[in-house]
Image (cartoon, coloured by chain):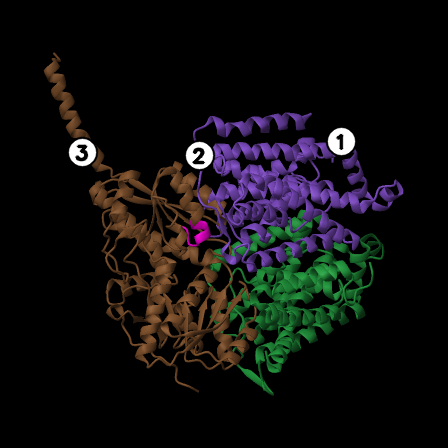
Chain colours: A brown, B purple, C green
Amino acid sequence: MITRRNSLAAAGTAALALPGVLRAQPATVKIGLVHPVTGALGEGGGRCRLGGQAAIADINAAGGIRSMGGARLDALLGDAQGRPEVAASLVEQMAEQGAAAFTGAYSSGLGLAATQAAARTGIPFSIDSGIADSLTGRGLANVFRFFPANATFTNDAMTALEAINKAAGSPAKTATLVHEDSEFGTSTAKLLAAKLPPIGIEVKSIIPHATPTRDFTNVALRIKSEKPDLVMMTNYPGEYTLLARTLVQQRVELAGLYSVSGGGFNLKFAKEQPQVAEGMMDFNHWYNPKDPRAPAFRKRIEDAGGVFSWEVLFGYFAIRLLADAMERAGSADKEKLTAALASSTFSDHFMPYGPTKFEGGQNQGAHASAQQIQRGDVAVIWPDRFADAKPAFPRPKG
Amino acid sequence: MISRIVAIALAALALVPFALPSQSLVSLAFLAVVAALLGTGWNIAGGFGGLTSFGHAIFFGVGAYATALLQARHGLSPWLGLPVGAMLGGLIGWLIGVAAFRAGLRGSYFALVTLAFAEAFRVIANSLDYTGGGLGILIPLRPGLSSFQFADRRTSYALALALLAVALAVSAWLRRSRFGARLAAVRESEDAARALGIEPLHVKAAALALSGAITATGGVLYTQTYLYIDPTIAFGPERSVEMLLVAMVGGAGTVLGPLLGALVLQGITEGSRALSTTPGVAPMLYGLVLLAVVGLLPGGIVRLLRGRAA
Amino acid sequence: MTLEIVAAALVGGLLTGGVYALVALGLTLIYGVLHIVNFAHGSLLMVAMFAAWLLFARFHIDPYASLPLVTLVMFAFGWVLYRFVIARISRGEDRAILLATLGIAVVLDNAALVLFTGDVRTAETAWSFAMVEAGPLLLPAAKLVSFGVALALGCALWLLMTATDTGRAIRAVAHEPEGARLVGIRPARTFALAYGIGTGCLGAAACLLLPSFYVSPQIGHVFVLVAFTIVVLGGMGSFPGAVVGALLLGVVESLGGLLLGESLGPIGVSLSFIAVLLLRPQGLFGARA
């Protein structure tokens, strides 16, 4: 006979048993990865995606999000193709497919559209690449950037240059800026032009150029006639490489090359073009070489056949930031996750950053570093506490 | 008759996003409608006028920048963007038309000169401070009717449908109006048209102007929806090619062609994306399907409606 | 701005023009003679460059040495592409040919992306850094070679078109397909042959470009508008015209960059194109249509 007490007890036992059933099948948390992987921006966007996928693999291999019962992360991949409207559409589709968070979108233009679309839904967005200050400056509560924004980035670039210059006896007194003429190059060059005079370097001229540019002989000759101590470039890989080569070909004598966000400055460049690359300095994003996990990560990417670059790092940590917040929130609910991100102190990383602290969505602890190609490899030369080599500056003449 | 049925079916389809709660469906529908709007604009010159253009992004970009500049540089209401953009698009269409046709350009020559103009506009937009140079123009986020920004995508979609309806009406008007007849006469044979007392130059330039005006409204809508414009987004060759494809694959010179083309091409894009996320595979499939469609349906998808006879 | 810099810009422009001529000569045949708006031209150049790069990276064959092989392979590829894809799909209709070449371009660009990823790759050969001193100027040896080969290729093509039966057949078919058929020339085969020759030229261009440039799936787009401008500027179908037009455009671009800056400079190409089309559509050496 089923009495009320019996049935209640039965119901109670069943209820107790249910979480066990749930626990046996950990939930999946979907994360939307929005990047341009085809078209002109496909090279960099593809690397960001690669990094993101590596992070998801690592987190799942380590047991998923433990505070959510070992929930696994699932990547929703989207190709933004370099068009903001596609990026926005992808975000909306992924939101409906249940994405708990987003990362992306390589370029600032795409990022602006994607983060805005995400803002309509309130789903948190962890920006990987795109340094435009406006990305976190629009007052959208769901947008977070773990990596440096343009203003901090260029400030640090100047601090680094000043330190490197002083340590060598200040041989650099003049500089010519060369930049590609879209948003990326123009905004950086503007900031640099304002900040170089205060550190004692006169700007001889600013030379914008189109992407693509097929020939840099004129630019090289102009630089040669101006005789600056430094050439500072901000451009994409093709043009970066071409300009660097042309400067060597035209025998332009410089105290050094100090690029700020040099697009072509990476390990491939160092290995494939040693003649040109040796001694080139770049202020850019890189890992903390003093943390053993960093070179191990790099090796893993290279062994898998990928090109290791900062985009891969960014894609990786943009996801790790999200996962860390999910751990602390114990949930992928968008409001809880947003709150957890805003109060994040994510420190389990190998980037050369100070403590994580978000203000208006921007991580105040994020800093880039100065690197130099020495003997076919990339070495970090500033700041001291993360450096693994001394700068070779100025260049020996002749 | 079949066209009428298809038209009604499409109209019904257009209302579906309003009925369903999905925001992404609205978003996709919006993209398709904007593509159809731009393709219809192209079609007025390229299809009905026989003036194939590779640089129609000029008009899209002019509309897009017009509304952006009105807000960002002059603090005026973005709603002015629609009339101002359309007028500028029309004016530039007229000027380019007169210049090109007075020089006797036609066929691929005309197409290439439009490409060159689009590229010139892109470089200029990239170099002037007024247009924000390479940085482009970012419109501050301020949802509200007065700032021509809508919190609900459905409102943007409704507006896009309205603009498309206007564009389609203009296309339909072209089919049966005197002006349309003159345009058709000029397209078939300029000499014969001249013998009938029609001045080809004026007719063609007018068609290009009309085309430009309509295409520009698409640009305005784009800027107001995505709130960011830069020279490549506005004037890039990809934009021009898209418009051309939509109209030609759908069926140039027909009213419904561009709309069908937009739907089919969007469908292929989304479909191929669903099949693979490996970079490059989806666009490659798109290209292959495109080749198949072009090969199997010469004259455009719209021919399916009418049977094989032209 | 010193005289030296202007002189350097002039000479540099001429040398760059030589490179442009290489890319434009193939298009002169395809667009200039056959009137095919070949949207796939840039993509085909990219394919050729990847072929040359592969031979260099995997088998260590210098691009200058692999030139004959790459040219032949590209010729075959172009011939097959026209005969079995473009001709089949378009059935000779102009609009459809355009869409077909567009589709091919999309497929090739993205196939390259799938196979090679978007990374920029270089091939450093002995010629990459060799410079020749000419007075106060330092000239890249690789560009001098390109210049020379461009002139030679222009001559060869001109001879082919004017002095050989094949050339006459191509011109006949382009001008008057029906008449050509009546005298026994087969239009479809001839078009395919011409398209193949045009693509073969891109093979040569690729090998000459590789030492001083880089290759990526996007590389073709860099040259496309310039190539079309040159074909029209030179006078549709005129090979000497294409070479002269290319040199002229190279100088215009170089001086434009010098005077207007490298950012606004590229407008020189578009404006030149517009000017030629509006003022003298038959180009430098073309006959009035």
Callouts 2 and 1 close, C-beta under 8 Å: no
Crowd tier of the residue under label 3, counting other residues whose Cα lies within 10 Å: few below 14, some 14–19, many 20 or above: few
The magenta span reads A105-111
Residue B55 image position (x, y, % from top left): 65, 51
**Of the pair B59 and B69, the residue shown nearer to us:** B69
From the image, state whether disc 2 or disc 3 is nearer to you: 2
Q: Chain of mark 1?
A: B
Please indicate, yes or no, whether residue C174 appears anywhere in the rendered image: yes
Same chain assignment for discs 2 and 1: yes
Which amino acid type corresponds to the residue marked 1 in the rendered image?
Answer: Arg
Q: In the shown orientation, is residue C251 left or right of residue B158?
A: right
**Residue A96 inside the magenta-drawn segment:** no
Q: In the shown orientation, is residue A3 left or right of residue A183?
A: left
Which amino acid type corresponds to the residue marked 3 in the rendered image?
Answer: Gly
Residue A333 image position (x, y, % from top left): 28, 38
CA separation in Å, label 2 and label 1: 38 Å
Q: Chain of mark 2?
A: B
Q: Which residue is mark 2?
A: B23
Q: Residue furthest right?
A: B195
Q: Chain of mark 3?
A: A
Q: Which residue is mark 1?
A: B176
Image quadrant occupied by the N terminus of chain C:
bottom right
The tag earlier along the polypeptide, 2 or 1, is: 2
- Could you tell me which secondary element the residue under label 3 belongs to? helix
Residue A159 image position (x, y, % from top left): 33, 69
Same chain assignment for discs 2 and 3: no
Q: Which residue is mark 3?
A: A20
**Residue A106 inside the magenta-drawn segment:** yes
CA separation in Å, label 1 and label 3: 72 Å
Q: In the shown orientation, is residue A310 left or right of residue B182?
A: left
